[in-house]
Each structure stands twice: as C-alpha cells, then as structure tokens.
Image (tube, rainbow, N blue to C red):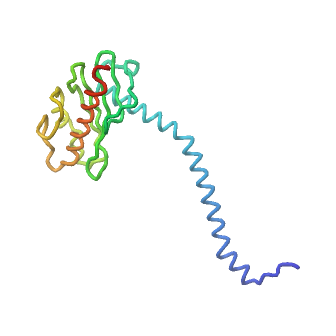
Amino acid sequence: MANNQTPEKQSAFKELVLPVIVLVAICLVCSALLAVLNDITAPIIVENTRAETLASYLSVLPEGTTEADMTEHADLTTPGVEGAVTTAGGAAAVKAAAAGYSGNDVTVYVAFDANGAISALSVDASTQTTGIGSKVAEESFTAGFLGWSGGQVASGAPVDTIASATYSSEAVFAAVNAAIDCYANELQGGV
C-alpha cells in the first residue's frame, strides 16, 4: 500500500499545484507582515503629520509665536478646511486645500492678524506641474494676498491668475476663500 499514484500524477502535482500553494503561502505571510508594519507605523505617521502641520502654522504666524501659544480648533465645518489654530494675541492660522491641476490638492496656510487681514500665506503646490502650476507657491504670487481683508478673493482681487497655471491659481483662490470663510464664521469672535 505504498504510493498508488502514477509518476505522471505526482509530476503534475509538483509542477502545477505545489507552486500555487507555495505562492499563496508567501502572499499570506507578506500580507500579515504588511498589516503588522502598518499598525506599528500608523501612529508615527500621524504624529509626524501633526508636527509638520504645527510647523507650517508657526511659519505663517507672527514671529515669536510658539507651539504653546497656539490653540488648535477641531470639528471645523467649513468645506476645504483641514485645521486651524488661534493665539491669545488674536492671530489665527487656517490650513485649507482645494483641487488644482489633475485634481491634486493645493494646500495653503493662511494667517490672519487680529483685525482679520491676511498677514501671511504659505502655499504647498508640490502636487502641481513643476515650473507651471508650482508658480502659485512663489512669493511673487503669494505676496499679493498680504493685507487683504476685502472678503472673497478671485482673479484680479487681490492678484491675477498666473498665465498657463489657471487650475493651480483657481485652487489657491478656492483654498484661501475657504480659509477666509472659516476665519469669519468659525474663528473670529472665538479667538
């Protein structure tokens, strides 16, 4: 009662079925390892993202502002707004994003002084076409927003759309408008 299988059946098993079983086992082990790695790195990624966001807030808030001076605001309802902070001195910074070229987000950090005027603007246009859409992050474009307190922004008020970067420019306008709405409707008076 040894092995009743013919050599052809044993060979077919070794050539067809055994490699499939081995590959499935390898895939299961790799999937399990990736799941464990994700569980280990997820809190680190969240903390690093938070630290980058706080650093970006500090970069647009008045000089001398520290992390301890900022109060984070959660549960903001303005569409496009991803977060905001205020300071005891009345300044505020809002992080907002809007879809630019190819649907990729353009993120802005808009700082407001105690009177509600835009005091600083930082634009992350790294998702936009280099040399074209990325121009919305240049000071020659962002400086035009400084001091603006005249409500919603649009092409021509306070700056013009960058030629050949219409989608990216419009994304900045939309994100800045979201930040203005958030400041006016959710932060002002609660600063």
Quadrant placement of the N terminus: bottom right
Q: State the residue at coordinates (57%, 50%).
A: 34
Q: Is residue 31 above or below residue 171?
A: below
Using residue 110 as the reference point, say whether residue 72 is left or right of it. right
Measured as percent of width and height from the top left, residue 62 is found at 28, 21
Q: State the residue at coordinates (54%, 45%).
A: 38
Query: Is residue 62 among the parts visible in the rendering?
Result: no
Q: State the residue at coordinates (20%, 35%).
A: 142
Measured as percent of width and height from the top left, residue 26 is found at 62, 60
Query: In the orientation shown, which residue stands out farthest toward the right?
Result: 1
Quadrant placement of the C terminus: top left
Q: State the residue at coordinates (30%, 24%).
A: 187
Which one is in front, 71 or 46? 71
Q: Is residue 22 above or below residue 182?
A: below
Where residue 74 sits, quadrant-wise, is top left
Measured as percent of width and height from the top left, residue 151 is found at 17, 30
Measured as percent of width and height from the top left, residue 17 is found at 66, 73
Give the total of numbered labels: 0
Where residue 172 sits, quadrant-wise, is top left
Query: In the orientation shown, which residue stands out farthest toward the top?
Result: 89
Query: Is residue 24 among the parts visible in the rendering?
Result: yes
Using residue 75 as the reference point, say whether residue 110 is left or right of it. left
